[in-house]
Amino acid sequence: MFKEKYDVIVVGGGHAGSEAAASAANMGSQTLLVTMNLQNIAQMSCNPAMGGIAKGQILREIDAMGGYSGIVSDTSAIQFKMLNKSKGPAMWSPRVQSDRMMFAEHWRLKLEATKNLDFYQEMVSSLIVENGKLIGVKTSLGLEIKAKSVILTNGTFLNGLVHIGDKNFGGGRAGERASTGITKDLINLGFEAGRMKTGTPPRVDGRSLDFSKMIEQPGDTIPSKFSFSDETEALSKQRSCFMTYTSPEVHNILKEGFDRSPMFNGSIESTGPRYCPSIEDKIHKFSEKDRHQMFIEPEGWKTIEYYVNGFSTSLPEDIQYKALKSVKGFENVKFFRPGYAIEYDYFPPTQLKHTLETKLVDHLYFAGQINGTTGYEEAASQGLMAGINAALKVQDREEFTLQRNEAYIGVLIDDLITKGTEEPYRMFTSRAEYRTLLRQDNADFRLTEKAHKIGLASEARIQKMEEKKTKSKDFVEFFKKTSVTTNEINPILKSKESQEVDQQGKMFKIFARPNITMEDMLSVESVKAYVEKHKLDSETLEQVEIQVKYAGYIAKEKQNADKLNRLENIKIPENFDYSILKSMSFEAREKLNKIQPRTVSQASRVSGVNPSDVSVILVHMGR
């Protein structure tokens, strides 16, 4: 029925579990994915979209390393948008609206086509641990499956409880049962556990909506895509989303049910996401606002189901329905299902190492919402890293981690294990201090070579990246070395109301002006000829424009990152006892003993550790 012993068992088939199983198997480990329902692999539990602010950068990083999320997002997309284009490229964030059913189907087919990967549909109810080391799992049917490593990616299923008004029932998602047993096992092993909550909006019948009363939200005129590979193509057609607003009348109806809303009235005591509040919270906290945006998102190419983004709620279904009927365009709305809240177990991520292996139990890894995060992209990136490190550990190879100046994934994991989280963690560009370096356009430059060295990114990936890198570098050099005459450039400068030049000069200086674009430079005959001769694509042209325009910012940020790396390279001995450092504050000693940072740089980011505490560590280590 099963192999005698697997290298890696992944528990849970959501976004974290899917990426974990794919990365471990693609690195040559015999892998088993165990999930309660194989029909729901990579299910989009909340909104049917991938990417967005900072999340789009994470998705491109996953793709650059050979993960599947970017490819599946492209092949199941119904709309593409590059967000924040009015800001600098560090803020540009790709996002796709997805076909929910197609997304799950494409993920499953990608996994089924992956070598070294087996599947089993059952609930894992307990872990098998001997002498502090994990050796396998036990299912609800009593089957014992042995493994060298186990990755838990249980999402919202661990003792999940669904709330709609004053009704509640066990479940990990609408219509699916909760997972039980593992929390008790982990607590018995000494793990600290907590409860978190999140909410989701109603799903409605598109045939009952009047879109003529809403504002259409189309995709980009020239859409791009997520994957750096040639496996996918940009969309040739797209579906629109729509925007409408709540009103004072809607708010008054909703207030009628506030005392019956478990997300709002305190009957759920666990912590919810501050940045994605329920409609109840929005009305209460922003009482001066008489309306809130709602985005009406299609669930696929052909389905009539729509997702009501911005109306997350756990109010009683009768109040939800009555309030929505008062929204412009929703006068005749029909529900597919009401919104609901879900409460679930999580384990504070300060109990993990940088590899996402637990500190308490060897060969046990956590990824996704079990670590107190939220979002498909955050979960997928953790799954990727847990799968990589579980495979490397089984193969007796060096661990693989990413630093804060190397990837948003590095920022995410470092934040989790050093600071923990008291509310569901999600990534923002503001969390990354080196966001000019960590752009969505250069994720392949940053990460593909690293992933190729550990055996994850393919040969085709590395060749494509190297070719793009060489072409970009050569084109930048062309601008630095090639001069342009006043006759060629002044008409362009005049048309852009930019100061004209009185003598011939290098193109780089002209191109670096903020109001001069690549499109402008392509009007110069020598530039146009270069592009045609070297067959440069739009991706390379975008990369070169960013490198020219932001050269100063990028150089400065690299300098700052180099300073960080000096502290990052000073290692702290494993299981170091900070209590011997009497000149350090008590809070710092207590927290550092709990977190056990691996480097001085990481120690400096632990909450409660100040610069003088860092100096004490450096002096003790002879620095």
Image (tube, rainbow, N blue to C red):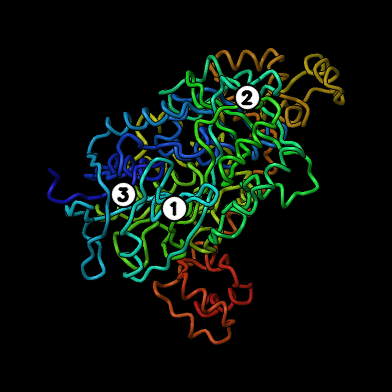
Q: Residue at x 32, y 70 (%)?
A: 188
Q: Residue at x 57, y 13 (%)?
A: 532
Give 75 or 49, whichever is nearer the viewer.
49
Residue 407 shows up from this direction: no
Query: Is 483 displayed left or right of 391 in the figure?
Result: right
Amino acid found under the numbered disc labelled 3: Val
**Alpha-carbon neighbours of circle 1 within 10 Å: few (<14), some, or many (≥20)?**
many
Residue 610 shows up from this direction: yes
Q: Give the vertical position of 571 relative to 581 (above or below).
A: above
Task: Tell me whether circle 1 and circle 3 mark residues in contact (CB < 8 Å).
Answer: no
Numbered mark located on residue 11 in the image = 3
Q: Position of residue 618 (x, y in %)?
A: 55, 75
Q: Give the vertical position of 101 relative to 44 (above or below).
A: above
**Alpha-carbon neighbours of circle 2 within 10 Å: few (<14), some, or many (≥20)?**
some
* Residue 529 occupies quadrant: top right
Task: Tell me whether circle 3 and circle 2 mark residues in contact (CB < 8 Å).
Answer: no
Location of the N terminus by quadrant is top left
State the residue position of label 1: 161
Disc 1 and disc 3: Cα gap in Å?
A: 19 Å
- Mark 1 vs mark 2: in front: 2
State the residue position of label 2: 332
Q: Residue at x 52, y 48 (%)?
A: 341
Disc 3 and disc 2: Cα gap in Å?
A: 42 Å
Q: Position of residue 181 (x, y in %)?
A: 30, 59
Give 88 or 164, whichever is nearer the viewer.
164
- Mark 3 vs mark 2: in front: 2
Q: Position of residue 581 (x, y in %)?
A: 52, 84
